[in-house]
Structures are given as structure tokens and as C-alpha cells.
Amino acid sequence: MSPGRLETFADGVFAIAATLLILTVDGAVEGHGADLGESLRHAWPSYVGYVVSFVTIGIMWTNHHTVMSLIARVDRRFLLANLGLLMCIAFVPFPTRLLAENIRGDGAESAALAYGFTLTATAVFFNLVWFYAERGRRLLRADADPRIVTGLNRTYLPGPWIYLGATLVALASPTASALLYLAIAGLYVFESSLFGGRTATD
Amino acid sequence: MSPGRLETFADGVFAIAATLLILTVDGAVEGHGADLGESLRHAWPSYVGYVVSFVTIGIMWTNHHTVMSLIARVDRRFLLANLGLLMCIAFVPFPTRLLAENIRGDGAESAALAYGFTLTATAVFFNLVWFYAERGRRLLRADADPRIVTGLNRTYLPGPWIYLGATLVALASPTASALLYLAIAGLYVFESSLFGGRTATD
Amino acid sequence: MSPGRLETFADGVFAIAATLLILTVDGAVEGHGADLGESLRHAWPSYVGYVVSFVTIGIMWTNHHTVMSLIARVDRRFLLANLGLLMCIAFVPFPTRLLAENIRGDGAESAALAYGFTLTATAVFFNLVWFYAERGRRLLRADADPRIVTGLNRTYLPGPWIYLGATLVALASPTASALLYLAIAGLYVFESSLFGGRTATD
Amino acid sequence: MSPGRLETFADGVFAIAATLLILTVDGAVEGHGADLGESLRHAWPSYVGYVVSFVTIGIMWTNHHTVMSLIARVDRRFLLANLGLLMCIAFVPFPTRLLAENIRGDGAESAALAYGFTLTATAVFFNLVWFYAERGRRLLRADADPRIVTGLNRTYLPGPWIYLGATLVALASPTASALLYLAIAGLYVFESSLFGGRTATD
């Protein structure tokens, strides 16, 4: 299988998962009472959840592309690691809805844990995908820029720990945990804006 | 990232958002009473909403393509602006359903405002995408036709104001506001029919 | 816009509309009572509807490809006609669900009319797409095979009338109308099997 | 129609069907009572179902690609067989949800049968697709590697029988049947991990 074929399939899953996030907002307003304006205001966590998860999936899509642009060929184990990653990405709309609906209620802790563990698992699979390809330059293109490779090594490794940390904070305070998820997404955007003058594969 | 890759992802989001609009119609007929014919007739605003939003998303997809055909390269800020745009596009099915279900009831004003603000935000991100690329010809191809560039400048700039105006009309009359959204989509179609003899990237 | 770009977008809508048909089956079994086996047997019209609409959308997708393979360029009117066609295709899951749920009840006539009018409108837009491109060979490739062109002319023209006829039968007997929709899809499959030895663009 | 065009459409259906599996999980938690944590734990069969079906669809997607990489041209019968295959793939989210929701209740047998028959039908269509193309090398590329062709012949032929066997086990024990579906998916993953050092088209 060519890397291009895998990318087409992956792009499809990323795009569909992101677009299905709207069902989060749909669900939050569906059971509204008499006053639509009131229920639209009350549903604000679902808008935040929509934006945070959309940005998170979007950033992961760009990162996935960066990885694929360095890949010369695809073997079955790499394919499996990618399936695992996409399985996590397609899962994201579910805990997003959970967190948006429960952040102000008794289920806040469970919802924040569900969201966090999903993103932790996603980050773990991202590392599997990348380091399986990178170890001994197993699947890398001959002309893969060593600085980009080193940069990705440095960027991906802490990912699972950062998300795991934010997840465990939920045991003390689900709200703090949710704010951390927001902050991580915000950081991605900020970092991209700051260094955005370079082309996207830098 | 090549412009082509971004387009594939964007095409996916545009196509899925447009196709998910059918859930608007589904929802409008779901709670029907004894007589299906009656409830199908009663659901007419959802058909109008389906058509208006489908056409609006379709036109935006063609405009997005026109922009991308002028782009030589993609940097991270441009990518972020595009993510914001796609986030708005994927959001459209939600206010479409709101407006279709509430235009004849107490929630008409809230629903018309929700629809209008979504399209205003979409137009704002369209301007961000375009003018970020166009300023100083930052991301444009060397052979980008100056007349098309000037034409897009003139076309996109008023977009947010037109939608914001139609949105604010909802404070006086939600029905008038909804008719304006319809008229704007109709205008796109009319203008395209009138000048349609030229090829689509003109 | 290149024909290839339009095809990518159209493929997305065709694929999503076909895949969303599963919600028809989902809905038919959802409100089941105590015995799952019984409710699965009771839901048989939704399986028939799923197959008929999936095959219909699939055949239309192949036909759309045949048209696009003859097209040299795309103008805005052609684009609009295609948007209209895709709007109808994305609509198909809705009347499919209506017909599957109501064929055995009071709403059979309304549901059969809704299904039929949707497919009639789809056939009308198919004719608009094709004959706009074909008239005076406006958008056709210079090397478009005249026999294929003549063949498509002969094939597409009766489409709306066939579907309109089957639709109007619903006024007398919704069941007969539903059987006609089934027969039309079956005919496509049969004809394709019979003459299938030729390559798909014949 | 070029094989590439068919692949794009098929990729769309595979990706959407896989991503829609999340609705399985959504549905399992939706009717939860007071305690979210409890209902999230109670919904564990839906997570298993999500993973098993996602992996199964993912493996089928890679197999479909292997077939398509050997194909020189597409005729209408081959197209029809592919439509049948995609119709089964798009159906998978439905029995997945059934099985996840009913494995612990009275409907376990019906649900396990529904899941099994769907996968059996999928395997049958996979054989139709492959052997229609392979018989007399009807649609194969001139340079199709005979060892891969023989390998696929050996791999695909037992598929329907394996799934039919696992399905019929449901008549004695739905749980055993569900464990077999799990084991089959696990086997695919294990086999891919074991022989994964080779490139994905081996």
C-alpha cells in the first residue's frame, strides 16, 4: 500500500470525526424546555467542547500529515498502528458530548476521565505510529530531513504524559481538568500562530 | 503541506456537512402525529432550510476551491484559518435545524440569530483565509491572475457585513431575517446562472 | 474548476448518502418491544429499502462518473446543476426511511409519493446536468465518443417519466408503487449483469 | 471507470462506516440513569463492539486495497459486486449496536445471528469481487504477481465458512459466538503483527 492511499482513508476518518462533533451540540439543545434562547445559552459547554475537539482533531490531522510526508512505504504493522490511531480519533465525539453534558453535574469526574483517557490513548497511538516508522529509519524516506525527525521525536514523546496528567487532575477537580484540555488545544493554536510564518511541513 | 492535501480534507468536511443536513428534515418529521401526509406538509420549513443551507455550503465549497487554485503553498497560520472556516461549515446543520423547527414559534428570534451568527462567523473566517494568503501576495502563486485576485477582494470583504445585517434584522422580525438568508443564497444562484457561461474559476 | 475536483466532492456526497442509509434500519428496529428476533423480522421493509436505495445511489454514482468522463471543463451553471443533483442524492435516506416505516400503515401513500418525487427530481437534475453539458457539445471533450453520447441521450431522457409514472401509481396503490421502485433498481442490476462484460464506461 | 475511481468511492464508504460505529457507543450510554460512571462501566460491550468492528472494517479495507492493486480495469459486473460488498460494509454498524446492547439480555441470540450473517454476507461478496476478477485473469493486470493471486485465492475462500460457523454457534451460545467474532478480528491483528515486517501489499 502506498502512503498516499493510507492518507486518503485517514483524511476521511479525520474529516468525518470532526464533522460528527456537531451532534454534540445537537444533543445538548435537543431536550430544551420552553425558551430556545435560554436553552441555547445554557448549552455553552457544548460549543466550547465542539471548538476544542475540532481544533484538537484538526491539529492531529496536520501532525499525521507531517508524519506521512516523511514515510517512504507502509507495512502491515504500521497500518495496524494507524488503524488504532484512527479508532481513537473516531471515538473523540463521544467523550466530547459526555463532557459537555456533564461538566456542570454529578457526572463531571467520569466525563472528564473519559475525555482524557481517549486523548491519552490517541497520543499513545500517535507515538506508536511515529516511532515504529522512525526506529532505525525503518519506513522513512531516504531524504527525510533529520531535523524534522528529531523535532517530531521531541514533540510526540511527552504527548501521552501531558494528557495523562490532565486526565488525573479530574480526580481532584473535573473543571480544572477540562480547563487543561482547553489550554492544551489553545497552546497548539498559539504555537502555530507564533511560528506560523514557516510552511506547514516545517 | 501541499494545497492539494488541504483541499482533500476540506472537501470531506464540506461534503459531510452538506449531507448531514438531511438530519434536519429527519428531525422535523420524526415527532409526527397520526397523519404522515399532514406532518410532511407541516415540515415545509425544513425542506427550505435544507435547500438554502445545501446551496450555501455548495457555493462556499466552490469559492474555497477558487481560493485554493490561487495558492502556491500552505503555512500553519493559513491552516489554522482554514480549520476555523471548516469548523463553521460543519456547524451549519445545527442552526439550520433550529431555524426550521422554530421559525413558526416562540424561538424564532433565537434561531434566526443562531443561523445568522454562524454564517457571519463563516464569512469572517473566509476573509481571514483569503486576506492572510493575499496580503503582500504571501501565499499566492506567481501566476495568480491579478484580476481574479482583485475580484475576490471585492467579493469577500462585504460578506460578513451582509450576513451580520441580515442577522440583526432578526431582532425586529425573524421571518424577514430568514427571508434574507434565502435571498442571499438565491442571489448566489442567480449570479452564477447569469454569468455561468464562463468557466468556474473565472 | 477541473472536472476531477467536482468528482471528488460528488463522490463524497454519494458515499455519505449511501452509508447514512443504515440509519433507516437503525430507526426501524429502535422502538422494538420485548423480543429482538421478532422486531428484527418485523423490520424487513427497512432492509429492502436499504438495498434498493443503496443500489439506486450506487448506479447513479456510476452514471455520474460516465458523464464526468466525457466532460472537458466545468462552468458555474454546470456546477449548480450538479449541486442540485447532489442535493437530491443526499435527500434519498429520508424518504427511504419514511417508506420503510410506513409501507404497512396509513402513511403508505404519502411515503411512496415522497420517495417517488425525490427520485423523479433526482432524474430531472441528472438530465439538466447531462443535457446542459451535451447541447452543442458545450462542455464535452473533443474526443467524446459520439456513440456513448447518443447512448446517454437515449438513456437519461425517459428517467424522470419512468419515476414520475411509478410515483403516481402510489395514488392507486402505494404497494404497487414501492414494487415498481424495486423493479427499476432490479432492472439496473439485471441490465448491468447482462451487458457487464464490457468495461464500465461503455 | 478506472480502478482508482472505484477505490476513492470505496474508501469513502469504508471510512464513514468505521466512523459511524461511534453511534454504537453513543446509543449504549444515552439512556443512562443517575450515575454516569456506573453507566460508562455498564456500557463495556459497546467499547468491545466498537473495537472489533473497527478493526474488522479496517482489515477489510486493506484487503480491498490489495485486490484493487491487482486490477487492470473495471467492468459493470465487477462494479456491482463491489456495490454489494460496500452495502454489507455500510451495514456493519447496525448489528454491532444490536450485539453490544443485547449480548447480556434475551436478544443475545438474534443479535449474534444478525452480526454473523452480516459478516458472512460481506465475506461472500468479497469472494464474488475477487473471483470474478481472477477467473481466467479476467480483470487482472498483466503484471499481477501469481504468488499474491494464489495467496488471495487461499485466503478468501474459507472466509464465508469461518463466519458462517461462528454465526451458527450463536444457536447454542450467543456469548461463544461473540467471542469467536472477537477471536477472528484478533487473529487478523496477530497475523498482521507477526508477518508485518513485509510491506502491506505482500
Image (cartoon, coloured by chain):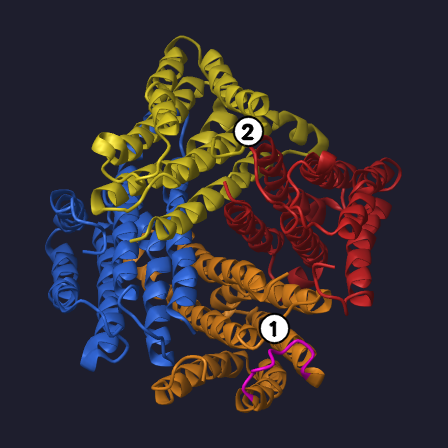
Chain colours: A blue, B yellow, C red, D orange
Residue type for callout 2: Arg
Q: In which quarter of the image is the N terminus of chain D?
A: bottom right
Q: Name the residue under label 1.
A: D72
- Magenta-highlighted stretch: main secondary structure? loop
**Label 1 in the same subunit as label 2:** no
Chain at tag 2 = B
- The percent coordinates of residue D67 (x first, y second) are 56, 76
Is-magenta flag for residue B145? no
Vertical position of residue C190 compared to residue C71: above or below: below
Q: Is residue B162 above or below residue A142?
A: above
Find out whether residue D140 is within the magenta segment.
yes
Residue A106 drawn at (x, y percent): 24, 48
Q: Which residue lies furthest to the right in this view?
A: C172
Viewer-nearest of labels 1 and 2?
2
Residue A131 visible here: yes
Q: Which residue is drawn at 26% across and 58% down?
A: A114
- The one nearer the camera, C11 or A82, is C11
Which contiguous range is marked in magenta?
D137-145
Q: Mark 2 points at which residue?
A: B198
- Position of residue C8 measured from the top left corner of the image (x, y, whole percent): 51, 50
Please name whichever residue, D82 or A44, is drawn nearer the observer in this view of the structure: D82
Q: Distance between the residues labelled 1 and 2?
A: 37 Å
